[in-house]
Amino acid sequence: MALLEAKKLGISFGGLRAVDDFNISIEKGALYGLIGPNGAGKTTVFNLLTGVYKPTEGIITLDGKDITGKKTIDINQAGIARTFQNIRLFKDLSVIDNVKVGLHNHMGYSTIIGILRLPQYYKVEKQMTEEAMELLKVFGLEAEADTLADNLPYGKQRKLEIARALATKPKLLLLDEPAAGMNPNETQELMDTIRFVREHFDMTILLIEHDMKLVSGICEELTVLNFGRVLCQGKTSDVLNNPEVIKAYLGE
Protein backbone atom coordinates (compact mmCIF):
# COMPACT_ATOMS: atom_id res chain seq x y z
CA MET A 1 0.00 0.00 0.00
CA ALA A 2 1.31 3.45 -0.94
CA LEU A 3 2.07 5.90 1.87
CA LEU A 4 0.47 8.79 -0.03
CA GLU A 5 -2.19 8.55 -2.69
CA ALA A 6 -4.07 11.32 -4.44
CA LYS A 7 -6.81 10.36 -6.87
CA LYS A 8 -8.51 12.68 -9.37
CA LEU A 9 -7.55 15.73 -7.30
CA GLY A 10 -8.80 19.08 -8.57
CA ILE A 11 -9.38 22.66 -7.51
CA SER A 12 -10.74 25.78 -9.20
CA PHE A 13 -10.29 29.43 -8.30
CA GLY A 14 -13.21 31.24 -9.86
CA GLY A 15 -13.08 30.23 -13.51
CA LEU A 16 -9.45 29.11 -13.35
CA ARG A 17 -8.78 25.38 -13.17
CA ALA A 18 -5.53 25.37 -11.18
CA VAL A 19 -5.22 21.58 -10.74
CA ASP A 20 -7.22 19.02 -12.70
CA ASP A 21 -7.42 15.21 -12.44
CA PHE A 22 -4.17 14.97 -10.47
CA ASN A 23 -3.11 11.45 -9.49
CA ILE A 24 -0.02 10.39 -7.58
CA SER A 25 1.08 7.34 -5.61
CA ILE A 26 4.19 7.46 -3.41
CA GLU A 27 5.58 4.39 -1.67
CA LYS A 28 7.07 4.50 1.81
CA GLY A 29 10.76 5.42 1.71
CA ALA A 30 10.58 7.00 -1.75
CA LEU A 31 12.42 10.16 -2.78
CA TYR A 32 9.95 11.61 -5.28
CA GLY A 33 10.01 14.81 -7.34
CA LEU A 34 7.19 17.03 -8.59
CA ILE A 35 8.37 19.29 -11.41
CA GLY A 36 6.91 21.56 -14.05
CA PRO A 37 7.09 25.10 -15.46
CA ASN A 38 6.29 28.14 -13.35
CA GLY A 39 2.55 28.35 -12.77
CA ALA A 40 2.01 24.65 -13.52
CA GLY A 41 0.27 24.08 -10.17
CA LYS A 42 3.03 22.44 -8.12
CA THR A 43 2.70 24.56 -4.96
CA THR A 44 -1.09 24.36 -5.30
CA VAL A 45 -0.74 20.56 -5.09
CA PHE A 46 1.35 20.95 -1.91
CA ASN A 47 -1.33 23.27 -0.51
CA LEU A 48 -3.98 20.65 -1.27
CA LEU A 49 -1.95 17.88 0.37
CA THR A 50 -1.39 19.97 3.52
CA GLY A 51 -4.89 21.38 3.94
CA VAL A 52 -4.12 24.98 2.99
CA TYR A 53 -6.66 24.52 0.18
CA LYS A 54 -9.59 22.13 0.16
CA PRO A 55 -9.91 20.22 -3.11
CA THR A 56 -12.98 20.71 -5.26
CA GLU A 57 -12.76 17.06 -6.26
CA GLY A 58 -10.72 14.01 -5.43
CA ILE A 59 -9.41 12.02 -2.49
CA ILE A 60 -6.12 12.16 -0.56
CA THR A 61 -5.06 9.25 1.64
CA LEU A 62 -2.05 9.03 3.95
CA ASP A 63 -1.13 5.56 5.17
CA GLY A 64 -4.58 4.34 4.15
CA LYS A 65 -6.45 7.09 6.02
CA ASP A 66 -8.57 9.68 4.22
CA ILE A 67 -7.21 13.18 4.98
CA THR A 68 -9.11 15.01 2.22
CA GLY A 69 -10.16 18.51 3.28
CA LYS A 70 -8.86 18.20 6.85
CA LYS A 71 -7.35 21.19 8.65
CA THR A 72 -3.62 21.83 8.26
CA ILE A 73 -2.89 21.08 11.93
CA ASP A 74 -4.77 17.76 11.71
CA ILE A 75 -2.88 16.78 8.56
CA ASN A 76 0.42 17.67 10.24
CA GLN A 77 -0.48 15.53 13.24
CA ALA A 78 -1.49 12.73 10.85
CA GLY A 79 2.07 12.76 9.51
CA ILE A 80 2.73 15.36 6.78
CA ALA A 81 5.26 18.17 7.34
CA ARG A 82 6.50 20.73 4.84
CA THR A 83 9.03 23.46 4.19
CA PHE A 84 8.40 26.50 1.99
CA GLN A 85 10.02 28.11 -1.05
CA ASN A 86 10.43 31.28 1.01
CA ILE A 87 11.95 30.23 4.33
CA ARG A 88 9.42 30.64 7.15
CA LEU A 89 11.36 30.40 10.38
CA PHE A 90 10.50 32.19 13.61
CA LYS A 91 13.35 34.60 13.06
CA ASP A 92 13.14 36.26 16.49
CA LEU A 93 13.48 32.89 18.22
CA SER A 94 16.72 31.01 18.76
CA VAL A 95 17.69 28.06 16.60
CA ILE A 96 16.83 25.55 19.33
CA ASP A 97 13.49 27.22 20.10
CA ASN A 98 12.50 26.92 16.42
CA VAL A 99 13.00 23.15 16.68
CA LYS A 100 11.13 23.00 19.99
CA VAL A 101 8.12 24.62 18.28
CA GLY A 102 7.99 21.53 16.06
CA LEU A 103 8.33 19.21 19.05
CA HIS A 104 5.23 20.77 20.62
CA ASN A 105 3.28 18.87 17.96
CA HIS A 106 3.58 15.66 19.99
CA MET A 107 5.02 16.80 23.32
CA GLY A 108 3.83 19.53 25.63
CA TYR A 109 1.93 20.56 28.71
CA SER A 110 -1.25 22.44 29.54
CA THR A 111 -1.37 26.23 29.78
CA ILE A 112 -1.87 26.02 33.54
CA ILE A 113 1.23 23.81 33.96
CA GLY A 114 3.21 26.29 31.87
CA ILE A 115 2.01 29.36 33.77
CA LEU A 116 2.52 27.84 37.23
CA ARG A 117 5.80 26.16 36.26
CA LEU A 118 4.68 22.87 37.80
CA PRO A 119 7.11 19.89 37.86
CA GLN A 120 5.64 18.52 34.60
CA TYR A 121 6.69 21.75 32.85
CA TYR A 122 10.38 21.30 33.75
CA LYS A 123 10.30 17.60 32.89
CA VAL A 124 8.84 18.19 29.41
CA GLU A 125 11.05 21.22 28.71
CA LYS A 126 14.17 19.21 29.61
CA GLN A 127 13.06 16.38 27.33
CA MET A 128 12.30 18.78 24.46
CA THR A 129 15.65 20.53 24.84
CA GLU A 130 17.46 17.18 24.68
CA GLU A 131 15.51 16.05 21.60
CA ALA A 132 16.00 19.42 19.90
CA MET A 133 19.77 19.27 20.50
CA GLU A 134 19.90 15.77 19.01
CA LEU A 135 18.19 17.06 15.85
CA LEU A 136 20.53 20.05 15.67
CA LYS A 137 23.55 17.73 15.95
CA VAL A 138 22.25 15.73 12.98
CA PHE A 139 22.29 18.92 10.90
CA GLY A 140 25.53 20.32 12.35
CA LEU A 141 23.73 23.23 13.98
CA GLU A 142 24.37 22.45 17.66
CA ALA A 143 26.99 25.23 18.00
CA GLU A 144 24.36 27.78 16.89
CA ALA A 145 21.62 26.49 19.22
CA ASP A 146 21.30 29.83 21.02
CA THR A 147 21.78 31.99 17.91
CA LEU A 148 18.78 33.89 16.56
CA ALA A 149 17.45 32.05 13.52
CA ASP A 150 17.58 35.29 11.51
CA ASN A 151 21.35 35.46 12.01
CA LEU A 152 22.08 32.09 10.41
CA PRO A 153 23.54 31.94 6.89
CA TYR A 154 20.98 31.10 4.20
CA GLY A 155 22.02 27.47 3.76
CA LYS A 156 21.82 26.83 7.50
CA GLN A 157 18.37 28.45 7.66
CA ARG A 158 17.24 25.85 5.10
CA LYS A 159 18.66 23.08 7.29
CA LEU A 160 16.91 24.51 10.34
CA GLU A 161 13.59 24.60 8.52
CA ILE A 162 13.99 20.91 7.62
CA ALA A 163 15.00 20.10 11.22
CA ARG A 164 11.89 21.87 12.55
CA ALA A 165 9.68 19.95 10.12
CA LEU A 166 11.27 16.67 11.22
CA ALA A 167 10.65 17.60 14.86
CA THR A 168 6.92 17.06 14.21
CA LYS A 169 7.81 13.38 13.54
CA PRO A 170 6.22 13.16 10.07
CA LYS A 171 5.73 10.11 7.86
CA LEU A 172 6.02 12.28 4.74
CA LEU A 173 8.21 15.37 4.29
CA LEU A 174 7.28 17.89 1.58
CA LEU A 175 10.10 20.20 0.42
CA ASP A 176 9.03 23.20 -1.68
CA GLU A 177 12.00 24.32 -3.81
CA PRO A 178 14.61 23.67 -1.09
CA ALA A 179 17.49 24.75 -3.37
CA ALA A 180 15.96 28.16 -4.18
CA GLY A 181 18.55 30.91 -3.73
CA MET A 182 21.44 28.51 -3.14
CA ASN A 183 24.82 28.53 -4.85
CA PRO A 184 26.16 25.28 -6.39
CA ASN A 185 28.13 24.32 -3.26
CA GLU A 186 25.10 24.86 -1.02
CA THR A 187 22.94 22.87 -3.46
CA GLN A 188 25.37 19.94 -3.36
CA GLU A 189 25.36 20.05 0.44
CA LEU A 190 21.55 20.16 0.39
CA MET A 191 21.45 17.05 -1.82
CA ASP A 192 23.62 15.24 0.72
CA THR A 193 21.34 16.47 3.53
CA ILE A 194 18.18 15.22 1.79
CA ARG A 195 19.72 11.80 1.16
CA PHE A 196 20.83 11.66 4.78
CA VAL A 197 17.35 12.60 6.06
CA ARG A 198 15.78 9.82 3.98
CA GLU A 199 18.21 7.22 5.31
CA HIS A 200 18.68 8.41 8.92
CA PHE A 201 14.99 9.08 9.61
CA ASP A 202 13.58 6.39 7.29
CA MET A 203 11.70 9.28 5.69
CA THR A 204 9.51 9.48 2.60
CA ILE A 205 10.19 12.72 0.73
CA LEU A 206 8.26 14.59 -1.97
CA LEU A 207 9.96 17.69 -3.33
CA ILE A 208 9.27 20.47 -5.79
CA GLU A 209 12.40 21.73 -7.49
CA HIS A 210 13.52 23.69 -10.57
CA ASP A 211 17.18 22.71 -10.23
CA MET A 212 17.46 19.81 -12.68
CA LYS A 213 20.86 18.77 -11.35
CA LEU A 214 19.34 18.24 -7.92
CA VAL A 215 16.24 16.53 -9.34
CA SER A 216 18.20 14.12 -11.52
CA GLY A 217 20.74 13.54 -8.75
CA ILE A 218 18.41 12.44 -5.94
CA CYS A 219 14.85 11.78 -7.16
CA GLU A 220 13.99 8.21 -8.11
CA GLU A 221 10.63 9.01 -9.67
CA LEU A 222 9.01 12.14 -11.05
CA THR A 223 5.62 13.57 -11.85
CA VAL A 224 5.57 16.45 -14.33
CA LEU A 225 2.76 19.00 -14.13
CA ASN A 226 1.80 21.31 -16.98
CA PHE A 227 -1.17 23.68 -16.82
CA GLY A 228 -2.44 21.89 -13.71
CA ARG A 229 -2.52 18.43 -15.29
CA VAL A 230 -0.12 15.49 -15.15
CA LEU A 231 1.99 15.48 -18.30
CA CYS A 232 4.19 12.52 -17.46
CA GLN A 233 5.06 10.16 -14.59
CA GLY A 234 7.73 7.53 -14.09
CA LYS A 235 11.41 6.86 -13.44
CA THR A 236 13.47 10.04 -13.36
CA SER A 237 15.70 9.25 -16.34
CA ASP A 238 12.73 8.22 -18.50
CA VAL A 239 10.74 11.34 -17.59
CA LEU A 240 13.60 13.78 -18.21
CA ASN A 241 14.20 12.24 -21.62
CA ASN A 242 10.53 12.31 -22.61
CA PRO A 243 10.12 14.60 -25.68
CA GLU A 244 6.90 16.13 -24.31
CA VAL A 245 8.64 17.01 -21.04
CA ILE A 246 11.62 18.50 -22.85
CA LYS A 247 9.27 20.58 -24.99
CA ALA A 248 7.03 21.79 -22.13
CA TYR A 249 9.49 22.14 -19.29
CA LEU A 250 13.07 22.29 -20.46
CA GLY A 251 12.26 24.53 -23.40
CA GLU A 252 14.33 22.57 -25.91
Image (cartoon, rainbow, N blue to C red):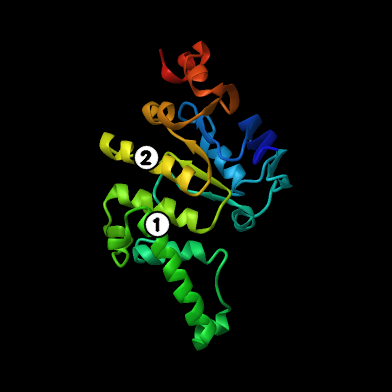
Q: Relative to 17, is 247 above or below?
A: above
| Quadrant of res 183 | top left
Q: Is residue 124 left or right of residue 155?
A: right
Q: Relative to 46, is 238 above or below?
A: above
Can you see residue 98? Answer: no
Secondary structure found at label 1: loop
Q: Is residue 100 left or right of residue 51?
A: left
Q: Amino acid at mark 1?
A: Leu
Task: Where is residue 41? Give x, y as percent.
Answer: 54, 33
Marked residue nearer the N-terminal end (2 or 1): 1
Along the line of sight, the residue nearer the viewer: 118 or 177: 118
Can you see residue 19? Answer: yes
Q: Look at mark 1 in the image and give the residue it sits on.
A: 89
Q: Is residue 234 left or right of residue 216?
A: right
Along the line of sight, the residue nearer the viewer: 14 or 55: 55
Q: How many numbered callouts?
A: 2
Crowding at mark 2 (Cα within 10 Å: few <14, some 14-19, many 20+): few
Q: Quadrant of the C terminus?
A: top left
Q: Look at mark 2 in the image and give the residue it sits on.
A: 192
